[in-house]
């Protein structure tokens, strides 16, 4: 209870500082007030275009995340056993991590339709994060415990349940936490540059072009909220799966 109260208090202080800053500047073009952002957001919520854009962007960005999680996990499992495979793919993953997102977006536009750009960029940016965390989780498992399990002829299902998953859960959670935020940032950036129709990135770009600061802040707040909700949702699902898998009521 105290933790929630503390979080609300801190948020309220920041909103107050934001309001004061907006009043001191006195120009909504440069810094719109939080109250105006809320009113703008409520007006957007009442339109069909708002929900359509959320659906389109959400489905494409989350598809990129699911692809990155699936392929990253498979690669991590394979390279944990095949070190030469890790050596082979490590350079390209390092290049992906070091290259600016904007560079990949511009290059990808040469090969990919702007409609699918956010899927590809989300996948590409999150893949190294998922791969690195999952692989590190596998490598962190105590080899002595694995040897003990093999001595007692534990089945693969029991090895996975009692040895691998408990050690990997923190790494999976970390991958989801970092990956979701990066996924949304890179995916929306791809939409802002590629400008596919009926997307949140397109609305952000239009707000910038027409100097509509309230809309710009309202869409930004929406993106942040969706990112946080998805992060909390994935972590909750992970905890629920682990409890059910281990038979915890």
Image (cartoon, rainbow, N blue to C red):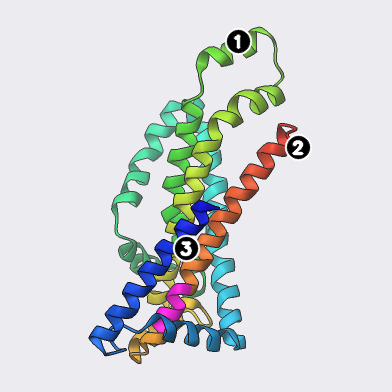
Provide the residue designation for mark 1. Answer: 148
- Residue 240 lies, in percent from the top left, at 68, 44
Foreground pick, 26 / 179: 26
Instruction: Calculate the distance from the C-alpha at mark 2 to the C-alpha at mark 3.
Output: 31 Å
Q: Quadrant of the C terminus?
A: top right
Which residue: 44% across, 70% down?
188
In the rendered image, residue 217 lying in the magenta stretch gets the answer yes
Sequence-wise first label, 1 or 2: 1
Q: Is residue 186 visible from the viewing direction of this image?
A: no
Taking depth in this image into account, of 235 and 158 the one nearest to the observer is 235
Q: Evaluate if marks 2 and 3 touch, with contact meaning CB atoms under 8 Å apart.
A: no
Mark 3 element type: helix
Q: Which mark is residue 170?
A: none
SS category of the residue bearing label 2: loop
Q: CA distance from mark 1 to mark 2?
A: 28 Å
Other residues around mark 3 within 10 Å, as few (<14) / some (14–19) / many (≥20): few
| In the depicted structure, whether residue 189 falls above or below residue 205 | above
Q: Which residue is mark 2?
A: 249
Residue at coordinates 51% horizontally, 74% vertically from top-left?
A: 115
Between discs 3 and 1, the one toward the N terminus: 3
Magenta stretch in the rendered image: 215-221
Image height of 150 relative to 86, above or below? above
The reply, left or right, for residue 8 in relation to residue 241 is left
Number of marks in picture = 3
| Mark 2 Cα-neighbour bin, 10 Å: few <14, some 14–19, many ≥20 | few
Residue 88 in the image: above or below residue 64: above
**Spot occupied by residue 144 in the image (x, y as percentages of width and height):** 52, 12
For the residue pair 56 and 171, the one nearer the viewer reads as 171
Residue annotated with mark 3: 8
**Residue 133 shows in this picture:** yes
């Amino acid at each position: 209870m105290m933790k929630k109260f503390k979080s609300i208090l801190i948020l309220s202080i920041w909103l107050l500082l934001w309001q004061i800053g907006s009043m001191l500047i006195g120009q909504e073009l440069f810094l719109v007030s939080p109250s105006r952002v809320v009113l703008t957001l409520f007006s957007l919520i009442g339109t069909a275009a708002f929900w359509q854009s959320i659906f389109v962007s959400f489905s494409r960005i989350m598809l990129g995340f699911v692809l990155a999680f699936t392929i990253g996990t498979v690669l991590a499992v394979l390279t944990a056993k095949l070190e030469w495979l890790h050596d082979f793919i490590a350079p390209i993953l390092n290049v992906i991590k070091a290259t600016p997102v904007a560079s990949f977006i511009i290059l990808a536009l040469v090969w990919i339709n702007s409609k699918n750009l956010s899927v590809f960029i989300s996948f590409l940016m999150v893949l190294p994060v998922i791969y690195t965390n999952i692989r590190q989780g596998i490598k962190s498992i105590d080899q002595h415990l694995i040897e003990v399990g093999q001595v007692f002829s534990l089945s693969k299902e029991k090895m996975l349940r009692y040895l691998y998953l408990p050690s990997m859960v923190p790494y999976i959670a970390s991958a989801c936490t970092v990956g979701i935020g990066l996924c949304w940032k890179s995916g929306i950036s791809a939409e802002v540059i590629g400008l596919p129709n009926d997307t949140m990135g397109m609305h952000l770009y239009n707000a910038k072009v027409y100097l509509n600061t309230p809309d710009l802040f309202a869409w930004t707040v929406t993106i942040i909220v969706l990112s946080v909700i998805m992060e909390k949702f994935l972590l909750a699902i992970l905890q629920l799966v682990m409890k059910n898998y281990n038979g915890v009521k």
